[in-house]
């Protein structure tokens, strides 16, 4: 994370954009030796921008291939380079059957939400006015915060997402080594209703006796007790007591 400290010192939007652009270029040139074998040196940075526009969505190489007019085999190699340089990461689906987790489609995120915002051209005004963009950026931010906290947690839970064919889903599923499960939903909203815990309730039913708690992180200020183990919690509680 120290690599991003200079970005915080950039006060103007222009200087911040220039720093992020320079950072991506430096990382790719310094760490990806395979770029020497790539005829189009702009292909990997372009892929990163396309992936940023799909952050929080399923990793679909067929769709990426159509968008970038490149073979899937090439895109998979480029994507592996982005993973190797810690610019992107995957979130696997949770399922009762451990074998299913490895074969189902993962979701893709960027390791740094500041970089994501840069690539999306996000400003404060745009976040306020475009709910879909705000939701994607906020979900990415929460996942990265949970990743960091899980790294020092004594229980060291693994992170997944959950989605059913009927459309029920939960943004983040945390499962410890004993199989205990916590579900986390992320809402870019200042108010919540009972419908906002529907996905968590469905997950709780699927998990059964290993269910621990469901949390909806939102932008409001109050903790909301929906029931004994379902709560709405302000996102700021991620980094404050």
Image: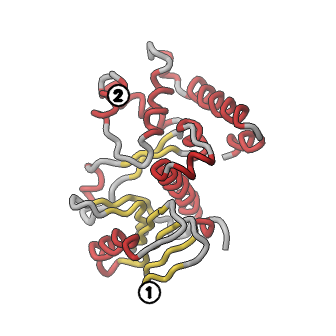
Asked if the residue at tag 2 contacts the one at tag 1, i.e. Cβ–Cβ closer than 8 Å, the answer is no
Give the mark, 1 or 2, whose residue is nearer the N terminus.
2
Check disc 1 and report its element: helix, strand or loop: loop
Residue for point 54% across, 50% down: 129
Q: CA–CA distance between discs 1 and 2?
A: 46 Å
Q: Quarter of the image containing the C terminus?
A: bottom right
Q: Which residue occupies the foreground of this view, 159 or 238?
A: 238
Question: Seen in the image, is 184 located left or right of residue 24?
Answer: left
Q: Is residue 23 visible?
A: yes
Check disc 2 and report its element: helix, strand or loop: helix
Q: Residue 180: x, y in percent?
A: 39, 74
Q: Residues within 10 Å of mark 2 (few under 14, many from 20)?
A: few
Question: Seen in the image, is 116 located left or right of residue 181?
Answer: right
For residue 67, which numbered disc appears in the image? 2
Q: What residue would you read off at disc 1? A: 228
Q: Residue 47: x, y in percent?
A: 44, 29
For residue 187, which numbered disc appears in the image? none
Q: Residue 42: x, y in percent?
A: 49, 20
Residue for point 48% across, 62% down: 187
Vertical comparison of 166 with 14: above or below: below
Residue for point 34% across, 68% down: 199
Vertical comparison of 207 with 228: above or below: above
Residue furthest to the top in view is 39
Residue furthest to the front in view is 129
Q: Which residue occupies the foreground of this view, 128 or 6?
A: 128
């Amino acid at each position: 994370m120290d690599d991003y400290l200079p970005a915080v010192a950039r006060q103007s939007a222009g200087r911040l954009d220039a720093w992020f652009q320079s950072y991506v270029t430096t990382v790719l040139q310094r760490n990806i030796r395979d770029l020497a074998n790539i005829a189009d040196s702009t292909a990997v940075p372009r892929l990163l921008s396309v992936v940023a526009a799909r952050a929080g969505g399923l990793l679909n190489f067929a769709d990426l291939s159509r968008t970038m007019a490149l073979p899937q085999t090439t895109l998979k190699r480029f994507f592996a380079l982005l993973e190797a340089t810690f610019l992107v990461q995957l979130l696997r689906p949770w399922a009762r059957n451990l074998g299913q987790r490895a074969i189902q489609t993962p979701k893709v995120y960027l390791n740094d939400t500041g970089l994501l915002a840069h690539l999306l051209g996000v400003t404060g005004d745009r976040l306020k006015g475009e709910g879909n963009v705000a939701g994607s950026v906020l979900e990415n931010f929460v996942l990265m915060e949970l990743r960091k906290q899980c790294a020092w947690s004594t229980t060291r839970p693994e992170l997944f997402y959950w989605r059913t064919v009927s459309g029920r889903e939960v943004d983040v599923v945390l499962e410890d080594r004993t199989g205990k499960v916590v579900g986390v939903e992320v809402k870019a909203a200042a108010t919540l209703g009972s419908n906002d815990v529907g996905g968590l309730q469905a997950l709780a039913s699927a998990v059964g006796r290993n269910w621990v708690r469901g949390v909806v992180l939102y932008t409001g200020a109050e903790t909301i007790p929906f029931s004994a183990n379902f709560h709405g919690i302000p996102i700021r509680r991620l980094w404050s007591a």
